Image (cartoon, rainbow, N blue to C red):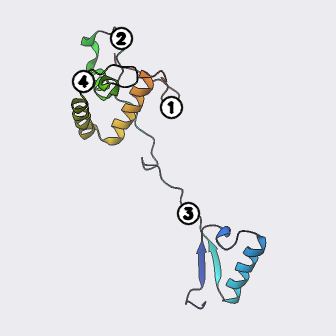
Amino acid sequence: KGKEGVDVAFIDHPSVIGDNYAEIIGGLSRLADAGMGLRIVRREPARSPSGGKSLPRPTVSVPEHGDDPSKFGAAGIKGMVVNPIYAGVADYPKMIPDEEWVGAVTKVIEEDGAEQFLVNLLYVLRRTFGCVEWDGHLPPDVN
């Protein structure tokens, strides 16, 4: 065992013991002189916030100008609720007070969860501002 009672040093990458060839060889020599082994351990890559699983598909649709409101369905209504343009974004006029938009969206987040809300918000913004792709495909709208 080495001086600290440890017989193996665990590191993520050889650069931990030196920045160049001479420093790495020097570090390895010091480990050998101390009677210690070396183990390079590959760490798991950082997990995505979604836990490594793919994101859910959007569950909203984006009603287009001139669409019949009676045909929006739940997906179309929810698409309108989560769309911040109605609270006044970019060139869109404010049609609902901020407090009402935030209150409505808070309820959607409570019902759907934060991840689904964010997927839906991203989808709505992409549709509203001209980027219609979602993972390379346009999901079918319900309207």
Which amino acid is tagged 2? His
Residue 130 in the image: state x and y as whole percent. Answer: 48, 21
The quadrant in which the C terminus is found is: top left
- The residue at the far right in this view is 22
Q: CA distance from mark 2 to mark 1?
A: 25 Å
Above or below, comparing residue 10 to residue 137 in the picture: below
Residue 52 in the image: state x and y as whole percent. Answer: 46, 48
Q: Which residue is mark 2?
A: 65
Q: Earlier in the sequence, mark 2 or mark 4?
A: 2
Q: Earlier in the sequence, mark 2 or mark 1?
A: 2
Q: Which residue is mark 4?
A: 96
Q: Considering depth in this image, is 14 or 74 the residue closer to the camera? A: 14
Question: Which is in the foreground here, disc 2 or disc 4?
Answer: 4
Residue 90 in the image: state x and y as whole percent. Answer: 40, 24
Q: Earlier in the sequence, mark 1 or mark 3?
A: 3
Element assignment for label 1: loop
Q: Earlier in the sequence, mark 3 or mark 2?
A: 3
Question: Which is in the foreground here, disc 3 or disc 2?
Answer: 2
Q: Earlier in the sequence, mark 4 or mark 3?
A: 3
Above or below, comparing residue 1 to residue 70 in the picture: below
Q: Residue at x 27, y 19 (%)?
A: 73
In the picture, residue 19 is in which quadrant?
bottom right
Categorize mark 3 by other alpha carbons within 10 Å: few (<14), some (14-19), many (20+): few
Categorize mark 2 by other alpha carbons within 10 Å: few (<14), some (14-19), many (20+): few
Q: Earlier in the sequence, mark 4 or mark 1?
A: 4
Q: CA distance from mark 4 to mark 3?
A: 49 Å
Q: What numbered label is drawn on residue 135?
A: 1
Which amino acid is tagged 1? Asp
Element assignment for label 3: loop
Q: What numbered label is drawn on residue 43?
A: 3
